[in-house]
Amino acid sequence: MSFPTTHPALAKALGAKGYREPTPVQAAVLAAEPDRDLLVSAQTGSGKTVAFGLAAAAPLLGDAERFDAAQAPLLLAIAPTRELAIQVSRELTWLYAAAGARIVTCVGGMDARQEQRALALGAHIVVGTPGRLRDHLERGNLDLAGLRVAVLDEADEMLDMGFREDLEEILDSTPAERRTFLFSATIAKDIAALARRYQRDAVRIDTIRRDEAHGDIEYRAVRVAPNEIENAVVNLLRYFESPGALIFCATRERVRHLYGSLRERGFAVVQLSGELSQKERSDALQSLRDGHARACIATDVAARGLDLPELGLVIHADLPANTAGLLHRSGRTGRAGRKGVSVVLVPYTKRRPAERLFAAANLDVEWSGPPLADEIRARDQVRLLEDPLLNEAPSAEELELAERLLADRSPQAVAAALIRLHRARLPAPEDVFDDGGGRGPGPRPQRPDGGARPDRAPAMDYGPDAAWFRLPVGRSKNADPKWLVPLICRLGHVTKKDIGLIRIFDHETKFEIAPAVEARFRDAVRAAADAGEIRINPASAPPNQASRAGKGGGPPRRPPSKKGPPPKKGKRTAN
């Protein structure tokens, strides 16, 4: 299959870029009846920009080979974010280069006076964000009287971000006879209403399969202890070694913290959040595109519309808020025919919400624990042995240096040095807790007696003076002291020796805190809960604690059943 007949200048540009056949959305747009408006829903990364660029060629150029001198814009493309607008402008620049198009980009965060001067010099195509375009329109800098084509890219995102009034004012200022191309991931009620108001007899194009997930994205769910999310991110980056990765966090604070943590470990990473200046954001994206950075940590808002080259991995460090968020985040990879992996980190405490999320998205998700350090080291060995450098023909200079190295050293010593050099550039993998729960997301088997268990022998039994607290996490959520103790230490600003007995029940865990640090612990866990962390509350001691504890703080023992009534089951007394 080859591209349908297109304008000669655009056909030349497509050939130079290596385009041999259209994507489904491009083929559908080009096959639509001429002179019709378009209402298109398509997957992220499906080639929408080239699609509407090709469809606009006829109304913009007609039979002319090149544009006339630039005056008022003929095409206006509106995108929800600065990054997406800049990306659209970049795509249209190479597509219309041979036709002599002058393109001006108007986005928030850039110098408005410079944009004003560029508009005054004339433009064939203007690309921008709704707020900045409206501002130029109201100031008289943008003249839309001669507009022939209006494009709304990711219209659903623009409405979600509150740009309805801006869009309406812009479109109301355009000629009635213009053609309008509206692209949206979904055609919800508000999008349909916008289409009815501003489009005439639009051709409806839908290239999204509703009954299946994006075929080029492999979805994985990784069970992880709540206090080991950062370590899991480290191991995922090391395990996959993707040329480009995008890591999503729920808040700016989480972005900053994870960015610092990965930088400290030696990863080449950048961050994107709404608090960064436009220059900082542009520099970060350029670092990813030129390969100086391997991973980008971002919030949902900052990552809207990003199209990054070689992005093979998406990591959800925080669970997406909803199905749309999951699919939008994941859609940053698996673009333009490339394969990608989307990994959702699922803390034990949030397994059920994650299961509901995957079910609502109709995704076939592979469950597993986080990659272990030994698995990563094994992969490193394979990657080293398969490195293309080992098979490249050496130059004369390299052979001479190799002979000098081997003159005083054994081949094994030189190879060992090569291995050390290879490993030195790789951040060390982290030791992470794996509950060994197999591949399924289901809960662990229940204890036959349904009661609590003493999961570790404490350093000290604080007796009647101990302060007891509770976590809303039990065996049903894979509670285990191996990750509970570090979590309690982090949230409460205490050390391991300050924690006494730990009793794990089906749906909660109770534990002792040393009297000397009780006040500090209460303040710390209250502040952590206010910041959105898991909540730790004061609690009463488990029933019959004194009779169950051994001397010296040893493991509690169940009294023989023949003496007195049987002990109460922890499942009933602790919940």
Image (tube, grey):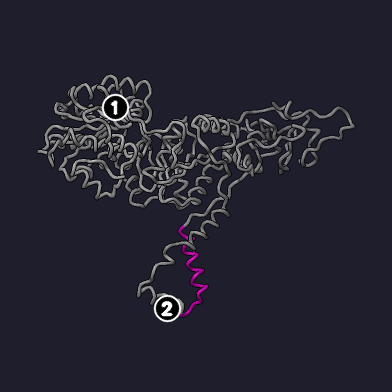
Left or right side of 109 for 366: right
- From the top left corner, tell me how far across and down residue 308 is, in percent: 36, 44
The image position of residue 202, as x and y in percent, is 27, 25
In this picture, residue 454 sits left or right of residue 364: right
Left or right position of 122 against 365: left
Residue 123 visible to an observer of this rendering: no
Q: Is residue 452 left or right of residue 240?
A: right
Q: Magenta segment range? A: 407-425
Q: How many marks?
A: 2
Rendered image: mark on residue 102: none
Residue to which mark 2 is pinned: 404
State the residue lying farthest toward the right.
562
Q: Which residue is mark 1?
A: 203
Image coordinates for residue 355, horizontal then vertical, percent: 55, 32
Name the secondary structure under disc 2: helix
As drawn, which residue projects farthest toward the left?
69
Give x and y (percent) for residue 382: 51, 59
The residue nearer to you, when weighing 344 against 517, is 344
Q: Residues within 10 Å of mark 2 (few under 14, many from 20)?
A: few
Q: Are marks 2 and 1 in contact (CB under 8 Å)?
A: no
Q: For the residues marked 2 and 1, what is the alpha-carbon distance in whole angstroms?
A: 71 Å
Q: Quadrant of the C terminus?
A: top right
Q: Secondary structure at mark 1?
A: strand
Q: In the rendered structure, which amino acid carries the disc numbered 2?
A: Arg
